Structures are given as structure tokens and as C-alpha cells.
Image (cartoon, rainbow, N blue to C red):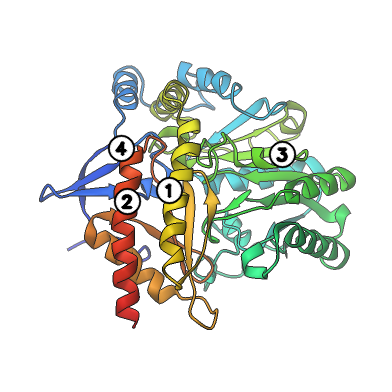
């Protein structure tokens, strides 16, 4: 009998039959509080009525209008509407289906625009699983193991992970920028470097926000050497961090040359995009990149409804407010649990990192806490290079009561996992 491939492992035992808002329901009717949001995808919650209606209406008119063959209204309208939220100057868009595809499109554009072969990425970054994107990914060996040889021309510079380095934010930034300068001096010469590719908040790498000053440092070096700055906001963008884009926390000038978005863009429908200035995008060779399903009409309609809901329900502000509430509760749990060594993140993108008494990563306790939470009805995921961080990414529609419900379940799960360890 056919079965699912074991190449992907299910993180929870739930088989969902219905979703509504922050909750998933299984075949037995049990309700599960979903603080995974499909890895940050269902930004407006499961089956938001306005998204459902937009999809239903569009599916009755046009499902697929392949955008190298014909244009369609949802695609054109979405392009116009995204101009209201994109960083100033990024006025030209290319659409694909997944974050991996969009990252590869961004790299291809950077190489074509500069005529240079190399890319510099940052330790702990995740950019996808396709061969090119996996070559840029250093968030864990599982994304790269036994798939080589990978794409050449990739150099890795330090990311300013202050907790891991045992430094404060400014010192971590100085360390990382000095490391980048060393990479440019020893591994990838500036005149051979097409792009810096970085997540403003590491996702799979452990929910680590870049401290203030790091992105500005990248911007300065990109300008100095004619390098394209690519910000991968696939997971941390679209309101997730309490700002529309995570790089907006940077007080210095950090506007990207290319911005990559996906996940929360269309509330569960496959859609991704890269945005760049028209003069940069014009350097792409026509026909060099594309895809059959990119810019799908139904997905674009879902994205338009998502933008409406985020605006009308003030979800970016809600992410900031409820994220602060969630962070306070997570810190409270950490204060009474020595195994939780750090709580970090921004907005509704928060992680609790587990360490052993000797300071080494503790993926076992993190995994037990995540599984104990699932048994209690709270769905969570792990992340981090060692898999020792449990992340919380609820839909941007989450309420204060749902935050408190999750925190109560999380406190029980952590206590149970620590007792099992003892």
C-alpha cells in the first residue's frame, strides 16, 4: 500500500480535519491550540472567513492563468497593493511558489546584475532545501547531508548570535562584521561577491534577531563594494515580528536591494516573491527564471485578502502587543526553570532555548517539552542548529486569552520534561 515518504518527519501526532482561527481539530473532535501556524504560514489564522471567501470567489472565475502566457487581475492588483507595504524603492516583483524558489531567484538576479559568482551567507541561516538554497543554508547539517556536491561559490560569515557568543549586542555585531571582513579578505573577494544573503531574524537557526547595527553594517559594505544585499524575510516578514518587515527594527540604513517573502504572504496558499528596484530587476535575463504556478490567481487572491485582514484588524500592532505578553510569560517560565537558558525573538516569533547544567545544548529536553505540549493540546516546533530551541509562532490574530492558555500549557509541559530529565 502506498505511504508517505519518511524524508519528512511529523512533529506532532495530530491528523487535522478542520482548522478555525488558532485551533486545529482532529477526527475525534479534540481541539489543539496551534502555535506553529504551519511554520509561520497561516498568518491570519486557519480559514479566516475573508480569505476563504476571496478564494471561493476567485476559484469560480479563474484558477490558473500562467503568468508568462496571460496576465490576470489578482496578479496585477497584488503587485500594486504590495507597493503599499514594501520598503521604499522596491517597486518590481517576481512571483514563485516557495521560499526556496524565491531565494534562488534572488541569487540568480544578483549574479546576473553583478556578473559575479559568489554569495556570502551567515552562520545559522536557513534559505531552503533545493540544491541551490540548501547550499546557502547553515542552520543544520540535515539540510545538506548526503546531497553533495552542493553549489560552489558560497562563503559563510559569522552571525551576531549574542547569547551563543557570550557577548552583548554591540560586541556580537562587531565580532560578526569583523568576521565578514575577514571572509572578504580571505575567501570571497569583494569583486567576486554578488550578494550578501541574510535573515534579519534567524528562523531554523534558533529564532535569533540580528542585534541593532548588523544590517546597517552589511548595507555599508554592500554599498562600498557593489554587492547586492538580499534580506530573506520568508519567515520573519509580513508582520510576524511586530513590524511589517523584521529589518525595520534596524535603526541604521538597512533597506535591502532584494527582499524575499513567502509563508505568511497568502495565509496558507503557495506563493512567494522577490522585490527589487526596477533598475536592478531589469538586469535579469528574460526567460532565465520562471515557474508554471508562480503568481497563481487563487493564491494571489488569498494574498490580497491577507493584506486586507492585516490592515483592517491591525494585526502588526497585535503581533507586537501579544508578542510582548507571550515574551513576559516565557521569561517567567524560564526564571523558574534552569534548563531554559534563553528566551529571545521579536513579536510573535519567540524561542526558548534549552541547555544542560554544563552549558551544552540540550535537544533532548527541548524535544520532550515540545512533545509534552502536544499531548496537552499545544502544538509547537523545535529549531536551532542543535534542535534545542522550542519556537512559538502563533497566527497574528492570536488573543491575550489564547496567549495565556498557551503559557499555562507550556508551563506544564516544561515542568514535565524537566522532571523526566531528573
Q: How far apart, in angstroms, are the residues tagged by discs 4 and 3?
A: 31 Å
Quadrant holding the N terminus: bottom left
Q: Which mark is residue 326?
A: 1
Q: How far apart, in angstroms, are the residues tagged by discs 4 and 1?
A: 20 Å
Q: How far apart, in angstroms, are the residues tagged by discs 2 and 4?
A: 17 Å
| Residue nearest the observer in this picture, 154 or 398 | 398
Q: Earlier in the sequence, mark 4 or mark 1?
A: 4
- Asked if marks 2 and 4 touch (Cβ < 8 Å), the reply is no
Q: How far apart, in angstroms, are the residues tagged by discs 1 and 3?
A: 30 Å
- Asked if marks 2 and 1 touch (Cβ < 8 Å), the reply is yes
Q: Residues within 10 Å of mark 1 (few under 14, many from 20)?
A: many
Question: Which residue position is annotated with label 2?
Answer: 406
| Residue nearest the observer in this picture, 10 or 8 | 10
Q: Of tags 4 and 1, which is closer to the observer?
A: 1
189 displayed left or right of 163? right
User: SS of the residue at dot 3?
Assistant: loop
Q: Height in image: 87 above or below 27?
A: above
- Asked if marks 1 and 3 touch (Cβ < 8 Å), the reply is no
Q: Quadrant of residue 419?
A: bottom left
194 displayed left or right of 358? right
User: SS of the residue at dot 1?
Assistant: helix
Q: Which mark is residue 46?
A: 4
Q: Of tags 2 and 4, which is closer to the observer?
A: 2
Going 30% across and 79% down the picture, which residue do you hit? 420
Q: How far apart, in angstroms, are the residues tagged by discs 3 and 2?
A: 35 Å
Going 66% across and 52% down the picture, which residue do you hit? 210
| Residue nearest the observer in this picture, 353 or 222 | 353
Q: Residues within 10 Å of mark 3 (few under 14, many from 20)?
A: many
Question: Which residue position is annotated with label 3?
Answer: 256
x and y percent of residue 86 in the render? 62, 28
Q: Of tags 3 and 2, which is closer to the observer?
A: 2
Amino acid at each position: 500500500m502506498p505511504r508517505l515518504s519518511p524524508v519528512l518527519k511529523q512533529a506532532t501526532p495530530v491528523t487535522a480535519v478542520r482548522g478555525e482561527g488558532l485551533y486545529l481539530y482532529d477526527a475525534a473532535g479534540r481541539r489543539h491550540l496551534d502555535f506553529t501556524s504551519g511554520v509561520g504560514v497561516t498568518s491570519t489564522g486557519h480559514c479566516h472567513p475573508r480569505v476563504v471567501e476571496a478564494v471561493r470567489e476567485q476559484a469560480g472565475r479563474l484558477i490558473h492563468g500562467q503568468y508568462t502566457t496571460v496576465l490576470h487581475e489578482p496578479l496585477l492588483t497584488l503587485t500594486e497593493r504590495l507597493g503599499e507595504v514594501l520598503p521604499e524603492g522596491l517597486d518590481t516583483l517576481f512571483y514563485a511558489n516557495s521560499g526556496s524558489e524565491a531565494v534562488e531567484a534572488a541569487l540568480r538576479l544578483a549574479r546576473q546584475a553583478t556578473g559575479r559568482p559568489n554569495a556570502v551567507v551567515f552562520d545559522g541561516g536557513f534559505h531552503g532545501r533545493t540544491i541551490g538554497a540548501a547550499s546557502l543554508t547553515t542552520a543544520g547539517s540535515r539540510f545538506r547531508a548526503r546531497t553533495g556536491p552542493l553549489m560552489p561559490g558560497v562563503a559563510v560569515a559569522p552571525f551576531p548570535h549574542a547569547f551563543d557568543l557570550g557577548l552583548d549586542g554591540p560586541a556580537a555585531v562587531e565580532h560578526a562584521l569583523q568576521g565578514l571582513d575577514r571572509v572578504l579578505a580571505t575567501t570571497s573577494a569583494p569583486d567576486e561577491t554578488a550578494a550578501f544573503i541574510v535573515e534579519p531574524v534567524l528562523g531554523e537557526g534558533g529564532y535569533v534577531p540580528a542585534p541593532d547595527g548588523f544590517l546597517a553594517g552589511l548595507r555599508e559594505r554592500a554599498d562600498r563594494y557593489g554587492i547586492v544585499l538580499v534580506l530573506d524575510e520568508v519567515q520573519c516578514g509580513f508582520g510576524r515580528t511586530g513590524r511589517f518587515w523584521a529589518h525595520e527594527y534596524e535603526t541604521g540604513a538597512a533597506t535591502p536591494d532584494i527582499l524575499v517573502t513567502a509563508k505568511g504572504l497568502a495565509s496558507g496558499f503557495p506563493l512567494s516573491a522577490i522585490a527589487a528596484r526596477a533598475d536592478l530587476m531589469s538586469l535579469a535575463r528574460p526567460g532565465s527564471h520562471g515557474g508554471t504556478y508562480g503568481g497563481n490567481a487563487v493564491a494571489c487572491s488569498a494574498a490580497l485578502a491577507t493584506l486586507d485582514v492585516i490592515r483592517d484588524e491591525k494585526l502588526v500592532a497585535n503581533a507586537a502587543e501579544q508578542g510582548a505578553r507571550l515574551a513576559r510569560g516565557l521569561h517567567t517560565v524560564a526564571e523558574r526553570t534552569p534548563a531554559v537558558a534563553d528566551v529571545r525573538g521579536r513579536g510573535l516569533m519567540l524561542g526558548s532555548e534549552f541547555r544542560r547544567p554544563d552549558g551544552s545544548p540540550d535537544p533532548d529536553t527541548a524535544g520532550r517539552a515540545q512533545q509534552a505540549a502536544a499531548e496537552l493540546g499545544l502544538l509547537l516546533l523545535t529549531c536551532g542548529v542543535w534542535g534545542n530551541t522550542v519556537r512559538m509562532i502563533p497566527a497574528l490574530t492570536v488573543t491575550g486569552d489564547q496567549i495565556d492558555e498557551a503559557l499555562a500549557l507550556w508551563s506544564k509541559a516544561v515542568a514535565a520534561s524537566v522532571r523526566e530529565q531528573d
